[in-house]
Image (cartoon, rainbow, N blue to C red):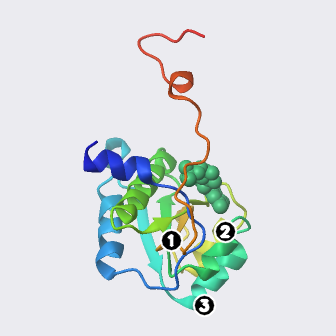
């Protein structure tokens, strides 16, 4: 299998990380991957933040009801979209995926933590001092996987159940 496919298929959501900083190069390249993602009409309606500040990480962990583990991550990315742009959600989700895969290309694991539909999104925006025209789409805590974290795929729907060629038949 080629390297790109191996990286993409090997990604897993990991929620426990080693107490070890992630290299600046990986941070920058992951954000570069996000910046290069496709967008409707090439609108690029986004802002990419990252924090390694333990106080901000702790606060993010308190705010994100399904992302308490952010508090113990060495870094967390935050992807914000311009809320009045029609395709901000699709665009920012494409960027989120690219960012996660960019990290994984360095062996750095992460986990998508919901933002757009969550009632804490405004609190996160204010905490990170992001202007009100943006809204939180996703939080991505990241770090090297903690010892014992298993890179095992959760059950995925079978290929033949979720794909079709030409026209769908049951
Ligand atoms: C839009 C979206 C929101 C998610 N939100 C959370 C979340 O808030 N907390 C969490 O622990 N995992 C979250 N996840 C991660 C999923 O639980 C995970 O992707 C899924 O269980 C499949 O596992 P895998 O990523 O290892 O393939 C989210 C994933 C997506 C795509």
Q: Which of the two discs, 2 and 3, sits closer to the camera?
A: 2
Query: 59 or 132, which is in the foreground?
Result: 59
Task: Classify mark 1: helix, strand or loop.
Answer: loop
Q: Which of the two discs, 1 and 3, sits closer to the camera?
A: 1
Label 1 close to label 2 by CB (< 8 Å)? no
Gap in Å between the C-alphas at discs 1 and 2? 16 Å
Query: 72 or 36, which is in the foreground?
Result: 72
Category of crowding for the residue at label 3, using alpha-carbon neighbours closer than 10 angstroms: few (below 14), some (14–19), many (at least 20): few
Up-down: is 14 above or below 87? Answer: below
Category of crowding for the residue at label 1, using alpha-carbon neighbours closer than 10 angstroms: few (below 14), some (14–19), many (at least 20): many
Which mark is drawn over residue 39? none
Farthest residue toward the front?
Answer: 148
Residue ID for mark 1: 145
Task: Classify mark 2: helix, strand or loop.
Answer: loop
Dividing the image into four quarters, tell me where ligand 1 lies. Answer: bottom right
Which mark is drawn over residue 55? 3
- Seen at 38% across and 65% down, the residue is 103
Query: 40 or 154, which is in the foreground?
Result: 154
Q: Quadrant of the N terminus?
A: top left
Residue 95, given in percent of the width and then of the height, sits at 41, 55
Ligand 1 within 8 Å, label 2 CB: yes
- Mark toward the start of the polypeptide (1 vs 3): 3
Gap in Å between the C-alphas at discs 2 and 3? 15 Å
Query: 60 or 75, which is in the foreground?
Result: 75
Q: Quadrant of the C terminus?
A: top right
Residue ID for mark 2: 67
Residue 2, given in percent of the width and then of the height, sits at 25, 45
- Seen at 58% across and 85% down, the residue is 56
- Seen at 58% across and 39% down, the residue is 156
Quadrant in the picture for residue 24: bottom left
Quadrant in the picture for residue 135: bottom right
């Amino acid at each position: 299998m080629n390297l790109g496919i191996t990286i993409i298929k090997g990604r897993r959501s990991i929620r426990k990380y080693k107490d070890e900083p992630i290299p600046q190069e990986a941070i920058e390249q992951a954000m570069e991957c996000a910046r290069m993602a496709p967008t409707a009409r090439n609108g690029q309606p986004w802002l990419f933040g990252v924090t390694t500040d333990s106080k901000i990480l702790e606060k993010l962990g308190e705010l994100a009801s399904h992302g308490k583990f952010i508090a113990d991550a060495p870094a967390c990315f935050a992807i914000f979209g311009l809320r009045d742009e029609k395709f901000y959600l699709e665009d920012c989700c494409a960027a989120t995926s690219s960012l996660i895969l960019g990290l994984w290309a360095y062996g750095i694991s992460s986990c998508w933590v919901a933002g757009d539909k969550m009632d804490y999104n405004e609190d996160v925006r204010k905490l990170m001092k992001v202007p009100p025209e943006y809204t939180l789409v996703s939080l991505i805590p990241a770090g090297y996987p903690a010892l014992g974290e298993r890179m095992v795929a959760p059950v995925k729907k079978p290929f033949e159940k979720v794909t079709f060629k030409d026209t769908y038949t049951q």
